[in-house]
Amino acid sequence: MLSPHPRVLSKDEELGKRDDDFRPKRTSSIGFIDPRRWRKRRVLLMLVVVGVLWLVLRSVPADLGTGVGRLVKERSSIRGEPTGAPPRGEQDAEDEERKKQYYNGPIKFFRLATSLHAISKTMGMRAVNRNVLFAAASLRSVANLMPMACEMARWDRNYVHLALMGRNTMSLDEVLEINGVTKEGCQVTFHDARADYSEYSSDLRLEIAVAGAMKHVNDFMHPQAIIMDDSVVEVPAFTRALRVKGKALGRPVIEIPKDGYERFLWLTRLDAGSLGSWFKPRIDVLVHAPKGSSGSLVRMLKSFERADYEGLKTPRLTVELPSEIEPFAKSFLRDMRWPLEVEGGSESGSGLTLTHRIPTEHLSSEQASLRFLESFYPSDGNTHVLVLSAQVELDRQYLHYIHYTILEHHYSMYSTPQAGNLLGVALDIPQRSLNGSTAFVPPTISSTRAPELPAGTKADPDDPAPFLYQGSSASATLIFGLKWAEFHSYLSNRIAASHTGKAIKSRKLVSETEPAWLEYLLELIRARGWYTLYPAMKFVTVHDELAQVPEEFTREVEAGQKGAETLRQNDHPEEEAFLIADEAPMMPKRDEGKLGGAGKPLHEMLPFDGDLPELAKLPLLSYTGEIVNETTLAGQRVAFEIYFREYIGGCDAEDAARPRVVRPEVALDLFCLPDAEAEYAETAEDVEESIANILGSLRERPSAPEFAVLPHGLPGVGGSGTATVEKAGAATATAD
């Protein structure tokens, strides 16, 4: 028979004969191609290698830190999920009677793929989205969180998900049934993220399973926030894993306090952007205590301690004490520990700061304002200051309202242009106008700018409504950090401009019963077009039995001598930027009333079923108390900005009218100071046209300053000086 490889086996084709002594050599390629040799050696070798790998992987312990990625597998249910108890090792068998959770084997998720693949088709896999995840391990926590998840889905601002990650073997349909929930009535996407053999998993395996499930969940939906039950209710292994994984993913893990589910229902009205910023806002509380106010101060601090802080970041507290402190107030502050929490078995009081003023001569308005603003400066844009008077008594829900409002209007993914002009959030409702001469009438729901109420809400047109107001309050107002930083810059430049001798002294628009810094703040508010958000119902009670005139405005009037003349003769006339009234101020009587929401959760206290309306729909009041629109307010802002630069900021008429570049946290655009270079918004060729356009939108300005009339007929509280805060023509400018 001929060889299959004659060219290889023939030694010499030309000889034409057989050589019996020739022995062909097998090359390596021939050995590899020969199937008989390949089966005998290589197949056997491969079987041995596969067997060894199987034995190694089978014996790898589940607690091997670097093996978490290999242990956690998510597979389709090809063979079906195993049932019954997993096999035990010898060591596991010894602990059978003592502990049921013994299994540390590889982890597989047989029920998670279906729901995750379904949402990836409908909701996408973008990193920034509307997904919010509720996660629970115990059935008790599922029952606690499910109503909240369904309520959030009802408001339809987020894609809401609920993942079950515990040991319980009850099917997802059974869990929904025992909680009285149907998928049709509750528009939540449910995920069964429990691993195989979950009932028998050790604590360590459960932790790894939760972390692995969260990795799969994050890969598919990228939840913006994770909401869980109180750690005292949940499974400890689940809590540990979720906290660690949330931190690793950069997602906030929001823990709802035990028995606080109804108190936190306002959370369901927030969008994913706000919930994703849950831990960003930091609040510093600043309290200024005047002389002789120790009783009011202690009452305020007790109400501050009694407020509901559970589940929220506790604010830091700074109390600015007067030069003379009464003994019982000193004793109370010595024993006060803030925040009221236990760390390592001892109370922590690191959140309380006391400052004490050194006695000085009578303060001017300028000195008092500087001293107050220097009490706080924000570290970044997420740090905000809550200014409280010693006369207030706080509602228990005050921090819930502040946190809710900040998240909605300051961090929402659907933030509106009006949010940029929001100075802060007030907790009280004014009873008097800024100058104290007339009563303040809060607007009602009928005054809102929305054509209709939010869907699904009910309200009477005569009910009080939240509103925007250019007047700020020293009783209880939160001011956003960046606005406070800009106020610092403004006051520094304002004082520098006053000392140049070019600034005209202005008549006060804010009553002398309010601290001097409010007058400076009102100037900045008008120049920027800012406003403060006021609630429909107050969250503080302002008591007036120990109310006092601010120290900078107290004075003794001698017989036959006017108050303004006394101040000019005895104090610091060069540091007074405003003309004060002829008569000494008198503290007005207030209707203290009662806090209307005692014992109610926040969403029941607020109108519109606890929903916060868009800022663009709220009534807008100018500092005079008149209801205006955004266009009118913009015209008033431009008019005052031009006037301020020319008569207070040290600019000439041409530079005052030229548009400037406005820098965040800096107020240099309002001044023409010797050491500061002005930044104009347009080129030199466009300046003349810009001036004509701006001035054309204003009423005709007089050729020489006339200071007899204030805008909208608002009387000032200043005395008989030669100048007031406004020019008649520019002050009343409007744009329809």
Image (cartoon, rainbow, N blue to C red):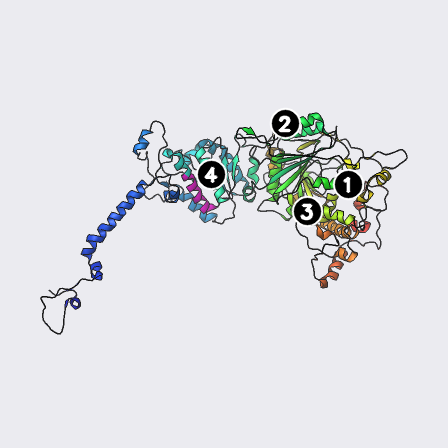
Say which mark, if any, is on residue 335: 2
Q: Nearer the viewer, mark 2 or mark 3?
A: 2
- Give the secondary structure at mark 1: helix
Taking 482 as reference, is 594 above or below it? above
* Residue 478 horizontal/vertical position (percent): 66, 39
In three-dimensional space, the C-alpha distance between marks 2 and 3, rounded to whole angstroms, equals 36 Å
Task: State the residue in front, 50 or 148.
Answer: 50
- Give the secondary structure at mark 2: helix
Labels 4 & 2 near each other (Cβ < 8 A): no
In three-dimensional space, the C-alpha distance between marks 1 and 2, rounded to whole angstroms, equals 34 Å
Instruction: Answer few, some or many: residues within 10 Å of disc 4's Cα (few below 14, many 20 plus, some between 14 and 19).
Output: many
Instruction: Answer few, some or many: residues within 10 Å of disc 3's Cα (few below 14, many 20 plus, some between 14 and 19).
Output: some
- Give the secondary structure at mark 4: helix
Labels 1 & 4 near each other (Cβ < 8 A): no
Location of the N terminus (image quadrant): bottom left
- Which badge, 4 or 3, comes first in the chain's sequence? 4
- Which quadrant would residue 484 be assigned to in this image? top right
Q: Nearer the viewer, mark 1 or mark 3?
A: 1
Q: Residue at x 58, y 47 (%)?
A: 414
- Residue placed farthest to the top in the image? 328
What is the magenta range? 208-224
